[in-house]
Image: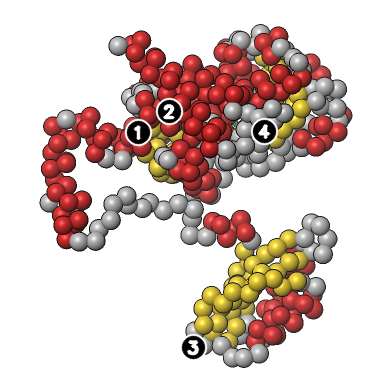
Amino acid sequence: MNVQSIIRNLIVETPSVPGNLAKVATAIGSIGGDIGDIKTMKIGTLSTIRDISCTCADIAQLNQIVEAINNIDDNIHVRSVSDDVMKAHEGGKIHMTSRVDVRSLSDLRRIYTPGVANVCQEIQREPEKAHYYTSIGNTVAIVTDGTAILGLGNIGPVAGMPVMEGKAVLFDQFAGISGIPILLDTSNPDEVVETVKHIAKGFGGILLEDIGSPHCFEIEERLKADLSIPVMHDDQHGTAVVTLAAVISACRYAGVELKDAVVGQIGLGAAGLAICRMLMAYGVKEVCGTDRQESALLRLRSFGGTVVDSVEETMAKCDIVIATTGVSGLIQPTMVREGQIILALSNPYPEITPEDAIAAGASYAADGRLVNNVLGFPGIFRGALNANVKSITYPMLLAAANAIVDATRNGDLVPHPLDPNVHKSVAEAVERVALIEMANID
Ligand SMILES: NC(=O)c1ccc[n+]([C@@H]2O[C@H](COP(=O)([O-])OP(=O)(O)OC[C@H]3O[C@@H](n4cnc5c(N)ncnc54)[C@H](O)[C@@H]3O)[C@@H](O)[C@H]2O)c1
Ligand SMILES: O=C(O)C[C@H](O)C(=O)O
Ligand SMILES: [Mg+2]
């Protein structure tokens, strides 16, 4: 097997007659497949289904193995082929569970009818008590229209559901928040805003996810204005917070004063424009940007950024380059300048791999798996929900970025996302600023 071999699980159905598994094993071996675990999933009267793990050289060999098994005879079939990633998604990644047990009739009467009616009336009398007697204050809607799913483009909200479920898993595990995916079959800003406003009562916050530009800007602004719960577009501000933290760390190591550095942003969509705005809010004097869309350039200008004509020019002019275009391989190694800091953040494939950027002379480089908004959004919402704040402000986001920097181990650009301290530190930083802001308003 070569180093790039792939492992797949073959779900094989055979007649429940001895000898058939041996035929399947021989078919796999004859093509060069290597059998790993075999799990019997079902033994029926007529047929047996097994999950056979198989290592193959590549997809072509896998296809030959599937064909060989299907050709054994008419009653032997490969029902499906899955891999670890697909397997982890079988049945979905999330499930709503109850926090109370129902073991007796009195449990039933306490948590359901008739007991629950008293709680309803209590909330009717004093609506703010919903915060204590329901899960609303700890639940965030993860809203997408499916128009900018990772860098895969407009693949629709249902195809984007695995990403939304992933965000819900991260909310739960890193911040103890219930995240509920909401899939919208419209990207018309009026309809999105109306829909979210009508469902908002059931949520303590709204995370907008993978909603493309430019409509994401209007949607977020209008929802922030109309709702009195925190609304944040993750791809804009979650990303901007983590990127700022990574840039601060990289500059410290490289001995560069960030505020005086020339920073270039390639791709001025949801993530890119927000990164530029965040860098300007931090105090960076010259933030340059390029995009293939004229409207995106105009937006950068309106926020005080400098427009640059091309990717090549950005690479030539800037000390620090950040890319969020969704275009894999956009930055050629020949464009990299000695000592440059390069964050190519597009998922699932970066504009240049960190290995290629470093080999071409970059002093620090990272991709979107490392510099990822997972380091931001769970803690930001935890802090905002804890403070019961009505909106997430720039000072809270800057505090979150600084908390990420403080939680970063010496030599790393950002902390490891599995380090629980980072999410806790972000939450505390956001809550602290939120409480100060609220005290100042009162
Ligand atoms: N690492 C992270 O945490 C993170 C967070 C958010 C987004 N992203 C990634 O960033 C990418 C963009 O996401 P988005 O939500 O900003 O999408 P978006 O569609 O809002 O923005 C993409 C922008 O890139 C521009 N663009 C495309 N090709 C270009 C090119 N050749 N030259 C210049 N500009 C070009 C587009 O015109 C658009 O303005 C995606 O791949 C996404 O996965 C990463
Ligand atoms: O989902 C991610 O991994 C990060 C980000 O939200 C993205 O859209 O790429
Ligand atoms: Mg996203």
For the N terminus, give its image quadrant. Answer: bottom right
Q: Say which quarter of the image contains residue 48.
A: bottom right
Residue 195 can be seen, yes or no: no
Q: CA distance from mark 1 to mark 4?
A: 29 Å
Q: CA distance from mark 2 to mark 4?
A: 25 Å
Q: Amino acid at mark 4?
A: Leu
Q: Amino acid at mark 3?
A: Thr
Contact, CB < 8 Å: mark 3 with mark 2? no
Residue carrying label 2: 383
Q: Say which quarter of the image contains residue 326.
A: top right
Answer yes or no: disc 4 within 8 Å of ligand 1: yes
Q: Is 336 drawn above or below residue 86 in the view shown?
A: above
| Spot occupied by residue 217 in the image (x, y as percentages of width and height) | 50, 25
Residue carrying label 1: 204
Question: In the drawing, does residue 435 fall left or right of residue 15?
Answer: left
Residue carrying label 4: 345
Name the mark on residue 45. Answer: 3
| Spot occupied by residue 418 in the image (x, y as percentages of width and height) | 58, 41
Q: Earlier in the sequence, mark 3 or mark 2?
A: 3
Q: CA distance from mark 4 to mark 3?
A: 53 Å
Q: Nearer the viewer, mark 1 or mark 2?
A: 2
Contact, CB < 8 Å: mark 4 with mark 3? no
Q: CA distance from mark 3 to mark 1?
A: 51 Å
| Spot occupied by residue 97 in the image (x, y as percentages of width and height) | 36, 53
For the C terminus, give its image quadrant. Answer: top left
Residue shown at the point (62%, 64%) measured from the top left: 82
